Amino acid sequence: MERRLLGLVPRRVLAGLGVLAAGQGVLLVVAAGLLARGVAGLDAGLLPWLVAAVAGRAVLAWVSSLVAGRAAAGVKEGLREALLAGGAVDAGARVTLLTRGLDAVDPFFTGYVPQLLAACVVPPLVVARLVAADWASAVVVLVTLPLVPVFGALVGLRTAALTGRQWASLHRLGGHFRDVVAGLSTLRAFGRTGHQSRVVRALAEEHRRATTGALRVAFLSSLVLELVCALSVALVAVPVGLRLLEGGMVLSTGLLVLVLTPEAYLPLRALGARFHASAEGVAAAQEAFAVLDAPPERPAGRVVVGEGVPEIVLDRVTVRYPGAERAALEEVSLRIGAGERVAVTGPSGAGKSTLLLVVAGLVAPVSGRVLVDGVDLAELDPVAWRRRLGWVPQRPHLFAASVADNIRLGDPSAGRDRVVEAARAAVADGFVAAMPRGYATVLGEGGAGVSAGQRQRLAVARAYLAGGPVMLLDEPTARLDVASERALVQGAARLLEGRTALVVAHRPALLSLADRVVRLRDGRLSEPAGRAGVVEEGRAA
Amino acid sequence: MKGLWGAVRPHAVRLVVAALAGVAAEVCGLALVATAAWLIARASQRPELAVLSVAIVAVRGFALAKGSLRYAERLAGHDATLRALAELRGRVFDALAARRRPEPGLRDGAGLRDGGALTRMVSDVEAVQDLLLRCVLPGVAAVVCGVVGVAVCGLVAPGAAVVLAVGVLVAGPVLAVAAAGAAGRVSARVAAGREELAVRALDVLEGAADLKVFGADGRFAAAAGEAAAGLRRAERAAARVSALVAGAGVAVQGCVVAAVVWAALRGGADQVGAAVAGLSALVAVESVLPLAAAAQRLREVRPAVRRVESVLAAPPAPRAVRPVAVPRGPLAVELLGVRVSYAGGGRAALDGVDLRVERGRRVAVVGASGAGKSTLLAAVAGEVAPAAGAVLIGGHDPSAYGAGDGRGAGDAGGAVRGLMQDAHVFAGSVRANLLLARPDASEGELEAAARRARFLEVVEALPGGWDTPVGTGGHGLSGGQRQRLLLARALLADPPVLVLDEPAEALDPVTADAVTRDLLAAPGGGTLLLVTHRLAALGAADEVVVMDRGRVVQRGRHDELVAVPGPYRDLWDAELLAA
C-alpha cells in the first residue's frame, strides 16, 4: 500500500528529496566540525562559515519541505479528480473522503517520506565522519544504532498484540459518550438523563483506567528508544573525556563526536513517530484506491436516431442490483406508443422507479432490451438519447446554484423568459417570486431550504424547459400537503401534453392524466399484457 | 474559560505533576549535553580525574533520568487529561440534557433537529484533550527549558546569556506567533477551498443521475475539477508557509549557536565556557522550536473549545419549583392555540392548534409530511416549547411533573413518554435498552410489552436472546426489528400519556396494520396519541385528527371521515390505490 502511494509521486521528485536530505546531512557534519573547531581553538573567525553552513542547511530544509508539500497537494488533486469521476453509493462518505479524509495523506508525504530518506542517508554520513574522527566512538554508535530499529520493532510487536486486545474494549468505552449524546432526546423522553449523567462519568473513568493501562505498555517503545539515544551520548562522552584527560585526543575531535553522536540517532527515532502519524493517511489512500480499482463501465453506444415523439418498447427486461436477493424487475415487457401516456402503480419496492431508470438509460438490464423506435437503447448514443428526455425523479437533486440555473440545467443558454415560462407551467412561479432574491436566490447545499413539494415543482420546470419529447415522471411518495399536490398535478398535466410519457403515480389525481394504467408487483408487470410479451402484441397492432 | 476550568481544576495537581515531569525531562536533556560539553572541554585542560568524576556520574544519571522522566510525563499527562476529560464529558452531558427547549434564534436550533450539532459536541470535547496534551504541557516544558538554558549559559558566559535570551525569544514566541498567524491565513483559504469542493462534489455525486439526463454532467464535473484545483493552490500556499517555518527553525538555531559562541569568546570565555554556552544554546533553542506547532494546534482547537465553553455557560432550563406527583391512571391532554416555529424554518410548524383529548382516549394523528404531526407530539411531550398558547397535561404544564431527570431524587417524574422520531437504540443488551423505560420492570412485564410490539419473536430469534448486544458495534437489527424494539420500550414505560410517532414504520403493511389496530383497541393503559401514515387500522381509533400545514383540518371517527369528501377521503383513496 505504501509502495503504491509512493508510486504516485514522480521518481525525480523522490530523487530530488533524497539529494536534498543528503545535502542537509553533509552540511550538518560540516557545521558540527566548524562549531567544534571554533570552540576548541577559541577562533571566532570560523563562526561566519558556521552561519553560512547553517544558512545553507536552512535553505535545503525549506526547499525539501516545499517539494514534499507540493508533491502531497499534487497527489491529493489527482486522487480527488479520480474520486469525483467514479460513481458513489454514499455521496456523503465520498465527500468526506474527498476533503478531510485525503488530508490525512499529508503526514505521509511531508513527514514520513522525507524522514525515511533522511534515515537512509544521514546516519551513514554521520558514522562515516565519526570513523574518520574517532574509531572508538564510531564503534559505540555502530553497535547501538541498530538497537533503535530492533528495539522499536520488538517492543512495537509486543505492544501491538497487547493494545490490539484492549482496543475493542477501549473503543466501546470511548464510544459511550457519543452514544448517549446521540440518544439524548430518548433519554429525556424516559427521564433517564440523571442516571446517565452518572454513567457517563463512571464509564469515562473506566475508559481512562483502561487507556492508561494500555499506554503504560505502548509508551515503553519510546522509553526504550529515548534511553538508547540518551545513554549512547553518555557512553560516548565519558570515554572521550577520559581519553582527553590522558592526552590521547584533541578537544576539537571530542566536541565533534559529542555534537554528532545524537544526530546519528535522531532520524531513526523520528521515523517511528512519523510512521505512526502517517498510518491514518495510508488508510485513507487505501479507501481511495478501492474506489479507483472498481471495474469500468461498459462502453456507450453511438447510434443516433431521429428526433420526434418516439415509441418505447420494453422487451422482457430484467434488472438485478448487485447484492440484492431478488431481481428489481423480472421479465417486464411493456409497449408505450408514440405520444401515449402510461401510468405505473404498485406498492413500494415493486420496481417502479427502476423502470424509469432503465428507460432513462441510467440502469442497464441484465437481460432483455429496451427499444426506442425499434433500436436497442444499449446501441444509442446516451447523450443524444437523454437530450430527448425530460425526467422528474422522486427526489430531484437541486444544485448549489441559483433557482434559475437549477431550472435551466438542461440548457444553460436559456434566457430569463424561458425560465419564467417553465416555472409558470410547473406552478412554481409563485413561491420562487416569494424567495428573497427571486430567481437569483442561490439554493443551499443539496437544495436546502426548499420543501419536498417545491423541489418537485422545480424539477417539473426543469423538465419542461429541457422540452424533450419523452417524459419520465416519478411521483414523490412523501405525502405533499393538499395545496402542493394540486399545484404539482396542474404542472405535470402541462408537461405531459403531446409527449410519450411513463408516469409513476401513487395518487388518483396524477393517474387521471394517463391514457393507460399498468401495475407492478415484486418486479413483475401484472397487467395488461403479463408475460406474453407486448412486442408481439405491438407487431400485431 | 470558567466552565472548562471547572472540569480541569479537580485534576490540576496531577496536571502540574505531569508538567513538572515534562519540564524535568527537557531540563535533563539540556543538563546531559551541557555536562557532557563541560566534561569534554574540562578534560582537555588535563585536571585531576577527581574533578571530572561528578560530571561522569552526572552524565549517566541525566541520560537515564531524561528517558524515564519523559515516560513518566507522557503517562501522567495522559492520565490527568483523561481524568479532566471524564469530568468534562459529565458536565457537557448535564448541560446538554438541561437544554431541553429550543430557543428561537439559537443558531444551531438546539431543539429536535440538532443531531449534527450534538455529535459535533462529542469531537469538540475531544479537542480539549489536544488543548492540554499538545498545547499546554509541551508549551510549559519548552518555556521552562528555554529559561534554564539561558541560566546555564549565564553561569559560564554572562554576555552570551543575553544573546541566547534574545535567540530563545525569537525561536520560541516570536516564531510561534508569526507561524500561527501566517498558517491561520492560509488555513482559512484551505478551509474555504475545502468547503467549495465539498459543495461541488456533493452536486456531482448526489445529482449524478439528474446531471446525466440533462446532459450537464460535463459542465458540473469541470466546476468540481476547478474547485479541486483551487484547493490544490491553497494547499500549496499552506505548504509554502510550513516550509518557511521549517527552514526558519534550522536557520535560527544555527545562527543563535554561532552568535552565542561568538559572544562567549568576545567575553573572554575559555574552551569550557564556549563549549558549554554553545551546546546549551543548541539544546535550549531546539526545545523551544515545538512552540510553533503548539501555537498552530492551539489556533485549530480554539473554535471547538469555545463551543464547549458556550454549552457549559448556557443557563439550565427552569425547573418546576414543586413537581406534581405523576398519577397512575391516564391524563387528559389539552392544546390551547399552540404555535411552534423552528429557528429559520419559515412557516410555523404548528399554527394555532386547539385540541382536547379526554383521559384514556386513543387518538390517531394523520396528514401530509410536514403537516406538523411530529411537532404536535413533541409539544405534548414538552420537548418543544410553544411560542404562543399552552399545552396542559392533566391540567398542568408538561414540565410541572418534574424534568424527569430528578438528579439526586432518583429518576422519576414526567407524565408523557413514548416513541419519538429520533428514538435511539443504545449500545448495550436488548434487555438494557428496554429497561431504560422502566428500570424496575419485572420479567413478565418485559415480555408482555415485547409481545404487544411483536418484538418477542425477534428476541427469540436473536443469537443471545435478551442479552444480545445491539446498537453501535452490536448485533445489526433490520429497520423493522429496530422499530419493534423501540415500540416495546415505549409500551413498557406505560405512562399516563403515551405518544407514538409512526410506531409501525418499516414493518410490512399487514403486520403494521395489525400492530396499529392492537395499540388502538387494547384495553387499559394511558391516553394515546399515535401518528401514522397508514389509515387501514384507524377504524379502531376513538378519534382521527387530520393535520395540514400546521393546523387541524378535520376531526372525527374513521367511518365518518371516509364518508365525506375532504383531505381524509383523499388520503384514504390514495391508500386503496397503492394496496
Image (spheres, rainbow, N blue to C red):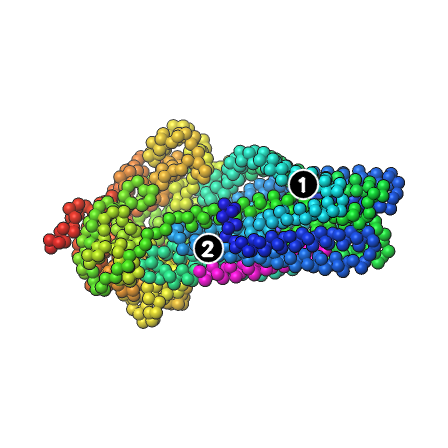
Q: Is residue A280 left or right of residue B524?
A: right
Q: Amino acid at mark 1?
A: Leu
Q: Is residue B445 visible?
A: no
Sort mark 1 into few (<14), some (14-19) or many (20+) by Cα contacts within 10 Å: some
Measured from the top left, where is residue A379 in percent x and y? 26, 56
The image quadrant that residue B14 belongs to is top right
Q: Are marks 1 and 2 on the same chain?
A: yes
Where does the image place residue B496, in percent across and percent down from the top left? 39, 39
| Residue A354 located left or right of residue B224 | left
Determine which of the numbered discs, if any, sits on residue B308 in the image: none
The residue at which mark 2 appears reads as A80
Residues shaded magenta? B225-254
Residue found 56% across the figure and 51% down from its top:
A109
Q: In the structure shown, which secondary structural element does the residue marked by tag 1 occupy?
A: loop
Give the percent coordinates (x, y) of residue B44.
84, 46
- The residue labelled by disc 1 is A145
